[in-house]
Amino acid sequence: MQAGPNPLSFEQRTTRISFIQRLLNSKKINELCGHPGRAAAKLCQRLWLNCASIPLMRAPTQRRGELTRDKLLDTAEQLFARRGFDGVSIRDITSAAGVDVSLANYHFGSKERFFDAVIERRAEQMNTRRMAMLEDAVTKASPAQPSLEEVIGAFMWPVAEIMMDGGAGGRAYGALIAQVNTSPHMARAKMGQFFDPVVREFLNVLQRSLPHCGAAELYWSFHFLSGALTLSMAETGRIDALSNGLCKSEDLQSVFERMVPFCAAGFRAACRVRP
């Protein structure tokens, strides 16, 4: 049996579709297709068959496009985490991923939209998990309010899950968000865009759990929680040096087991509320 033609790449398909669409819209082809000559009729038939075959190829093409997009995001996540936004170009990413730069432009456009896509991918996962845990804590405590440990745990443990269960990508993402959250020119815009709506939901529940806490104390307490979380996400290794190896920044289970009660106690102290 004769082997079929090799499947077209994503770029080849895109180029062919664009070419055929331009050709069919041209005045010359319209004139030819209206001509009764045999050659013109065959040409028109082939063009229309090409167009008709395009939807049939869409599903596998879409799948390959998704795989390429994920590969680019995985690579960008690692590079941005190591070198920061300014230290990485789109060409750096595509070269490391072994992907043509035109595909990065197709999927993301600019470097900033590329960077946003890296943040958004796991932010959606994190935010969904945070809200599910928060709603569960509120429901179980009803009609009372959930404890501070439950609310703060619902905010922090999804971070730990992504970093511990997401492999190298999850840890790179933690380091990347730590960079963004401590960047004067990125923190307000990026954290505001991807995380603040969920943060405000947590602040509302924390306010109900601490009804006598002043607004300023509540916000300062969250600010300190965010700082502790950010430093832990960065996994700098400083505690390893200070403790002579007794404590390890990569031991995220130990980090989060201690950080949740520590931050809850901080909220109570700042708001002068006893357990």
Image (cartoon, grey):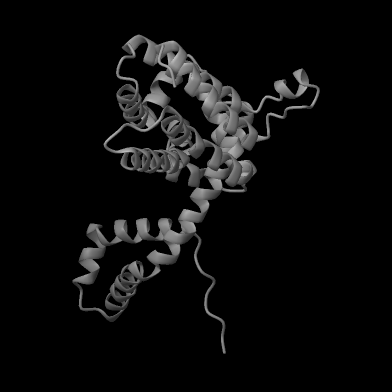
For the image, the number of numbered tags is 0
- Asked which quadrant contains residue 53, the reply is bottom left
Q: Position of residue 162 (x, y in %)?
A: 54, 42
Q: Is residue 224 above or below residue 257?
A: above
Which one is nearer the viewer's eye here, 216 or 232? 216
Query: Which residue is at a point 75% across and 24% down the rendered structure image?
Result: 240
Please, which residue is most extreme toward the right here?
244
In the visual, does 187 lie left or right of 169?
left
In the visual, does 43 lie left or right of 220?
left
Query: Which residue is at a point 54% across and 35% down the rendered structure image?
Result: 90
Which one is nearer the viewer's eye here, 60 or 155? 155
- Asked which quadrant contains residue 255, the reply is top right
Query: Which residue is at a point 30% across and 59% down the rendered structure image?
Result: 21
Q: Position of residue 155 (x, y in %)?
A: 44, 33
- Asked which quadrant contains residue 27, the reply is bottom left
Observer able to see residue 2: yes
Q: Position of residue 99 (x, y in %)?
A: 58, 48
Q: Is residue 95 above or below residue 144?
A: below
Which one is nearer the viewer's eye here, 242 or 24? 242
Quarter holding the N terminus is bottom right
Observer able to see residue 91: no
Quarter holding the C terminus is top left
